[in-house]
Image (cartoon, rainbow, N blue to C red):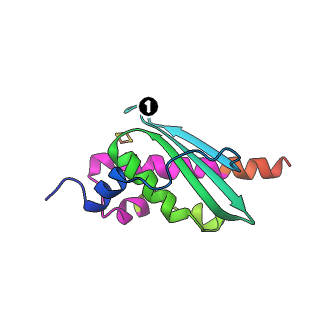
Amino acid sequence: MALYSEKVMDHFRNPRNVGVIEDADGVGEVGNAKCGDIMKMYLKIEDEIIKDVKFETFGCGSAIASSSMATEMIKGQPVSEAMKLTNKAVAEALDGLPDYKMHCSVLAEEAIKNALEDYESRKNNK
Ligand code: FES
């Protein structure tokens, strides 16, 4: 069996939603101290709906594939739904990740949660 699913390879080679949103409503950045990979998420939110999402990932192929898939999963979703996104759901949508690569999908979950928390705190400070 191939180590990585076709979906992982597809999202790694052609990542969706790569980039920066200059006037983002929420930005989240997380890193993994062990592997040194870093992921940054930008959210554009209108009426509690995620209108746009972009990411920058300095990391391994699984981290890039996970961030790409995660952005596709939350785009167009209400904030409350995006908050429930788990790394397991991201890995499943990618048709699985090797066990020792599961932490890469955790980075995607954390980056999104971080960006949503940033959005909430900006909202409360308005
Ligand atoms: Fe660290 Fe993939 S090896 S995020």
Residue 8 position, x and y percent, is: 31, 56
Q: Quadrant of residue 84?
A: bottom right
Q: Which residue appears at 46% of the width and 41% of the height?
A: 57
Secondary structure mainly formed by the magenta segment: helix
Q: Which residue appears at 64% of the width and 68% of the height?
A: 78
Q: Magenta stretch: residue 123 in it? A: no
Q: Which residue appears at 31% of the width and 47% of the height?
A: 101
Does residue 23 appear left or right of residue 97 in this picture?
Answer: right
The span picked out in magenta is 89-116
Q: In the image, is the residue at mark 1 within 8 Å of ligand 1 by its beta carbon?
A: no
Q: Which residue appears at 36% of the width and 56% of the height?
A: 11
Count of numbered badges drawn on the protein: 1
Residue at disc 1, secondary structure: loop
Pointer 1 residue? 33
Residue sitting at the far left: 1
Residue 45 position, x and y percent, is: 69, 59
Q: Quadrant of residue 87?
A: bottom left
Does residue 62 appear left or right of residue 51 in this picture?
Answer: left
Residue 123 position, x and y percent, is: 79, 52
Residue 52 position, x and y percent, is: 61, 58
Relative to 60, does residue 65 appear above or below in the rendering?
A: below
Does residue 66 appear left or right of residue 98 in this picture?
Answer: right
Ligand 1 position by quadrant = top left
Relative to 18, does residue 95 appear above or below in the rendering?
A: below
Does residue 124 appear left or right of residue 43 in this picture?
Answer: right
Q: The residue under label 1 is which amino acid type?
A: Ala
Relative to 125, does residue 35 appear above or below in the rendering?
A: above
